Amino acid sequence: MTAVFMRKIWFALIVAMALTVQAAQAASLTVGYLRIDAPMPPTLSNLDPLPEDDGLAGARTGLSDNRTTGKFLGHEYTLIERRVPEGGDATEAAREMLAMTPYLILDAPDDALLAIADMDAAKDALMFNAASGTVALRDDECRANLFHTLSSDAMRTDALAQVFVRKRWTDLVMIAGIHPQDIAYAAAMRRSVRKFGLTLEGEKTWAFDADMRRNAAQEVPLFTQDFGDYDALILADELHDFGRYVLYNTWVPRPVAGSEGLSPVGWSPVIEQWGASQLHSRFRKAHARPMTARDYAAWAAIRTLGEAVTRTDTDDPETLRAYILSDAFELGGFKGRPLTYRPWNGQLRQPIAVVHPRALVKLAPLEGFLHKTNELDSLGLDRPDSACGAFE
Amino acid sequence: MKPAFFLAALLVAAAPAHADEIWVTNEKDDTVSVISTDTLEVIATYETGERPRGVTFSKDYSRLYICASDSDAVQVMDPETGKILHDLPSGEDPEQFVLHPDDRHLYIANEDDAITTVVDVETRKVVAQISVGIEPEGMAVSPDGKIAITTSETTNMAHWIDTETLELFANTLVDSRPRHAEFTADGAEMWVSSEIGGTLTIFDVATQKEKAKITFAVKGVHPDRVQPVGFEFTQNGDHVFVALGPSNHIAVVNARTYEVEKYILVGRRVWHMAFNADGSRLFTTNGVSGDVTVVDVAKRKALKSIKVGRYPWGAAFRPTP
């Protein structure tokens, strides 16, 4: 597109804004994005560095989506961003942000999340966990002021289990890493295996400290030899440390799934349908990289607030909270179905994509996995499964 | 039988190579398929730019306009030869468009740019670019040519454009992911489909106020998968045929009472549609199954499916040349 063209567009934009920003006292929403850095253990490969603005970039794209809608309705949106380095004071940073706005998007370790949610200053806040999949946060450790836009580990492992059932890969084995995230993922996977009537015939822990770039070919076949035969191998390697060296190196030739290989994810660049390619191209244009599941979760959080402001014409937290949890709320999330919130634990209901790095394999819930109210609740903690009492 | 159709039928009998045609864009094959409404077979396939979606003819049917989304152009094709004559400047990622009754101005939704571009097809110049909501898609123009509509999928609005000043004069909220818009023939109502919301919203054009909303329920299909996208009015304006996307059904809606009278099973992920000359048959594009379903309009039943290219999307009717 030529520069003249671009100028014309900007001019049109400014004129449109001038025309639409008329009557004042309209809703004005400020959202805070707070990231609390946690120590990241080293991984064997340096091939895929995490983007510095993982999550935050999604919030920024969501902000610009909200602003476009807002300019037609006279609603204003602002994003304030804050990052606390390792060892910094998470609750103090949260307190400062809560003094400016009751709406926070949090990318924080679980203990910091709960510490923030339990602060007096956060009592009437509306906060979104956009980075932790820990099941307990949706279960007995849930908090009434903490919604979740990132899919839980259980939602993802249930999606993978549905694919196993559909493919009749019923005999499974698993290798889990030693990090808390790996252990949590493995626990969610065991629960999904039971839930969908599959069997886990063997489990091993990957505690090696060898550099697998040199000897994967020798180590993995031996390591997987005593599993015997099975239909698929599951990897619980959420930090993406050793898993990439397992593919094509197993003793028996079998598919690899879980953290690597066939992976259940909340969002991925390989999702093309349902208008997703438009969101990807908008995101890529703005941030020069692909959109991750964390970006998506932060995007969904800020869009949730935007959608609620658009429909209710207010920035009042109590009204927005009630609207978000009501049947009237629905978010277009580029995954082929309206996204809504579970009223029992504040989790955003959403399809889970089961992907490999080059294509979408299935979108869960798969056809045939029925549910008496909403098929999306066949993924993760359904109302009877959740011990969360804070919401209802 | 209407005289025009009778004449057409005679001509078909005399020269079967010149039957009426339905032109279908194949989004992932970069082609258009030409279907004979007489033999119900594909009689020609022509290459287009990348990702062809919206498609429409000039008033005299001598030019075919194609939104080649990934080529960032509206292409002009000679339907007699299938040759691309030239490209029109369209703005980025044109998805759908509508030809103004003046036969001269195309109103184009630029999906990636949150803009509606107005192009003069004679001078081949951009007349205006109008900022709208995110992911503009559905385009309509009132029968008197005074109002153009753009719907934006992520902003969830119908934007009302005054075609004289080329400025927005109203922005109305609809349900999630509005995809398509149409005016009634008398210009009194404007209808918008919402894919994720699962509804059709009907506006009173004079006041731009919502006057009714239609919901759908297909037996055996979860409501979330009943997703209205393209729709067309019958010639007499009595009924509206609505494509319901991944529910694989077309709904027949009574345009006077707003009641859904029937659901017709067609191919997978039905997008858009076009009627034949006398409105007795409807041709629907089915994205996932890569075919076109022919519906007997009176009997409200699918007659046949015709294999076309990959991911058929838009459809346009062309009478016997």
Image: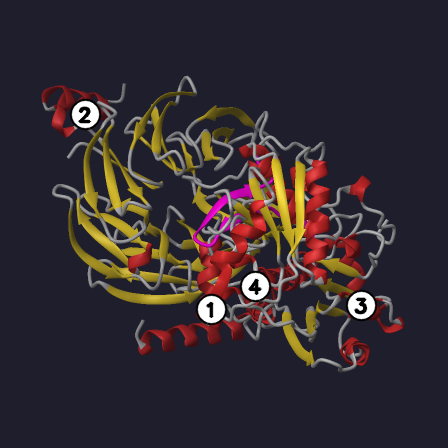
Circle nearer the viewer, 4 or 3: 3
> Can you identify the residue that label 4 sits on?
A69
Kindly identify which residue carries mark 3.
A111
Outermost residue to the left:
B14
Q: Which amino acid does label 3 sit on?
A: Asp
Distance from disc 1 to disc 2, alpha carbons, whole Å, reads: 55 Å
Mark 3 vs mark 2: give the one in front.
3
Q: Which amino acid does label 4 sit on?
A: Thr
**Over which residues does the magenta segment extend?**
A348-366
- Which chain is indicated by disc 1? A
Q: Are marks 4 and 3 on the same chain?
A: yes
Amino acid type indicated by mark 1: Arg
Image side of residue B110 versus residue B67, left or right: right
How far is mark 1 from mark 3, CA to CA?
Answer: 30 Å
Q: In this view, does A9 lie to the left or right of B41?
A: right
> Rounded to the nearest whole Å, what is the CA distance between mark 3 and mark 2?
76 Å
Say which residue label 2 marks.
B8
Q: What element carries label 4?
A: helix
Disc 2 crowd rating (10 Å Cα; few below 14, some 14-19, many 20+) is some
Q: Can residue A366 be seen in this view?
A: yes
Q: Name the residue under label 1.
A: A289
State whether residue A310 is above or below residue A122.
above
Q: Does the stretch in magenta take in A16?
A: no
